[in-house]
Image (spheres, grey):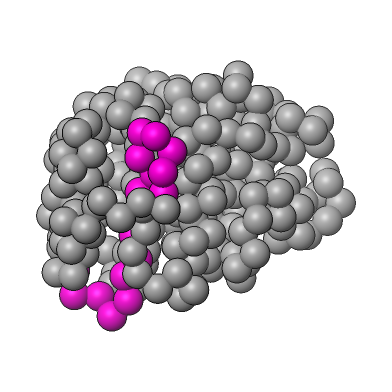
Amino acid sequence: MGTTLAQSFALTDSWSASNVAAGVIDQTGTLHITGDTDYRFRLASVSKLVTAWAALISVEDGSVSLDDQVGQEGCTLRHLLAHAGGYGFDNGAPIISPGRKRVYSNTGFEMLASHIATQVEMNFDEYLFEAVFAPLGMSSSELLGSPAADIHSTISDLALFAAELRAPKLLARSTYIEATSPQFGELEGVVPGVGRFDPCPWGLGPEIHGAKSPHWMATRNSASTFGHFGDSGTFIWVDPVANVACFALSNREFGDWALDAWPQFSDAVLIELGR
């Protein structure tokens, strides 16, 4: 475990959160970590990345297909993973036809998790454990509510998932490339709390940086950088060009402070690593 990022990690002291932990996997694959490694945080919407990984595993094992019809006419599992299903943030009814706009939706992720649970004939939290947590050794992680927002985990466990996002072992390379490439790529949409973007690229679960600016990722991140943030003060990104993963957990609600502090921290990490 590396300790060379002390200068960057010191920036997290200014986040005014009662608990903060952060981690980086550098270009050599070395893990750098700071904070209480045993404290369990609510991941909020970072949960969507883990849920998406389970969904993609269920596609690979043949339980479901990305072309499965889920919800309103014309809406598929692929649409829901990419926030293109036409469902609002937190309501059961569709608000627009599929594939028209990038409408960020907790509902869509709850729908796709329910679809997978039906097809695999087990509760989604059990499938998530068997598909993702157990094989990655994420022994402190648990789904306690919505698969869109209620996974609880530690920075140590998130480091294991970050390593998977950086160099997957649970997914075929072709699936991984598709998941981290823009789906319905020209759609405009809103990243909640950040802004409206046209286009607003998204993969099969991960948000993709593209040309979004200003943004919660680093200003130095490549356009192919992907990840997610959560409103409980959490984020994770992987930059395939820099070959770096960066992630942080806090219990300070997302707000303007994060749009200032997170890019500053992420840029500092990349500079300190010489990327």
**Residue at point 60%, 65% (across, down):** 141
Choose between 132 and 127: the one closer to the eye.
Answer: 132
**Position of 48 relative to 253 (above/below):** above
The segment highlighted magenta reads 15-31
Lateral position of residue 50 relative to residue 56, left or right: left
Choose between 249 and 212: the one closer to the eye.
Answer: 249
**Residue at point 18%, 75% (across, down):** 16
Please provide percent x and percent y for residue 95: 46, 44
**Position of 20 relative to 164 (above/below):** below
The answer to whether residue 54 is seen in the rendering is yes
**Residue at point 60%, 54% (across, down):** 110
Choose between 172 and 144: the one closer to the eye.
Answer: 172
Quarter of the rendering containing residue 66: top right
Quarter of the rendering containing residue 8: bottom left
Number of numbered discs on residues: 0
Q: Is residue 271 magenta?
A: no
Lateral position of residue 225 relative to residue 258, left or right: right
Please provide percent x and percent y for residue 92: 56, 55
**Residue at point 59%, 49% (across, down):** 51
**Position of 198 relative to 112 (above/below):** above
**Position of 58 relative to 21 (above/below):** above
Please provide percent x and percent y for residue 266: 22, 46
The answer to whether residue 42 is seen in the rendering is no
- Residue ranking furthest to the right: 121
